Image (cartoon, helix red, strand yellow):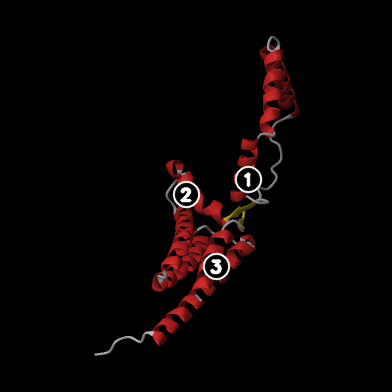
Amino acid sequence: MKNILKYLTIAGVLILFLPFFRMCSRPATPPTETVDSIAVSQIDTINESTYIYQDKIDSVQSVNEMNLKQNNSFSNKISNFCTRLFVQDNSLTGFGLGLLFPLSFSSVEFNKETIGLVFFFLILLNSLALILLSFLKKIKIIQTFACLNIFLLITSYILMNVYFNQILFGSYLFVINSLLIIYFATKYKKIQQTIIPPSGG
């Protein structure tokens, strides 16, 4: 029973790397510029580029070669991997949602959507804490944190005005996993009470 709780709490963190929320795609907007203005801007751009790079062909080539090397470098692969932890197929992972608030804290505006992101950050912290609590056998706290995670998830989606079709399978798996944690924690607590009955006066 104790091992099941450990596995479930670890699974809860891994589930956060799955898609939780589909971002709305922006509708296509018709171009507002006229043909003449576009042509003029393109000509200006070409002239400016020609003027800038006329005497710097060698430097441009070296920059391009360096960019090609960077695209194949190990650091770029790590960067792409980290990006996939946040965004997958136009959707945000639970991990990405959890880190949106601390990463944008300096420029964030305080509104109900921000509170929703704060709740996701708390979900991330709670999920990490649950792993530690499962090894420390803090069953009551595990129950409380698992219930809190479900409450925070539902409330955050309400605050962020998320539509039902935007909620992805990661969110459902997270709720199911949290319910299983609550179930097995309750069952384990009952077994403990049976083996060690509470002292009566």
* Kind of residue indicated by mark 2: Phe
Q: Identify which residue is drawn at 65% across, 47% down.
A: 26
Residue type of the residue flagged with mark 1: Phe
Q: Which residue is mark 3?
A: 7
Q: CA distance from mark 3 to mark 2?
A: 28 Å
SS state under label 3: helix
Please tell me which residue is depicted at 67% across the width and 25% down the height of the picture. 66
Q: Which mark is first along the chain, 2 or 1? A: 1
Q: Residue at x 56, y 69 (%)?
A: 177
| Residue 102 in the image: above or below residue 177 | above
The residue that disc 2 covers is 101
* Secondary structure state at the residue bearing disc 1: helix
The residue lying furthest to the top in this view is: 55
- Judged left or right of residue 40, residue 182 is left
Task: Tell me, yes or no, if residue 1 can be seen here.
Answer: yes
Whole-percent x and y of residue 92? 60, 53
Badge 3 crowding class, 10 Å Cα cut-off, few under 14, some 14 to 19, many 20 or more, is few
- Label 3 or label 1, whichever comes before in sequence order: 3
Vertical side of 162 occupied by 108: above or below: above
Residue carrying label 1: 81
Q: Position of residue 41 (x, y in %)?
A: 70, 23
Q: Nearer the viewer, mark 3 or mark 1?
A: 3
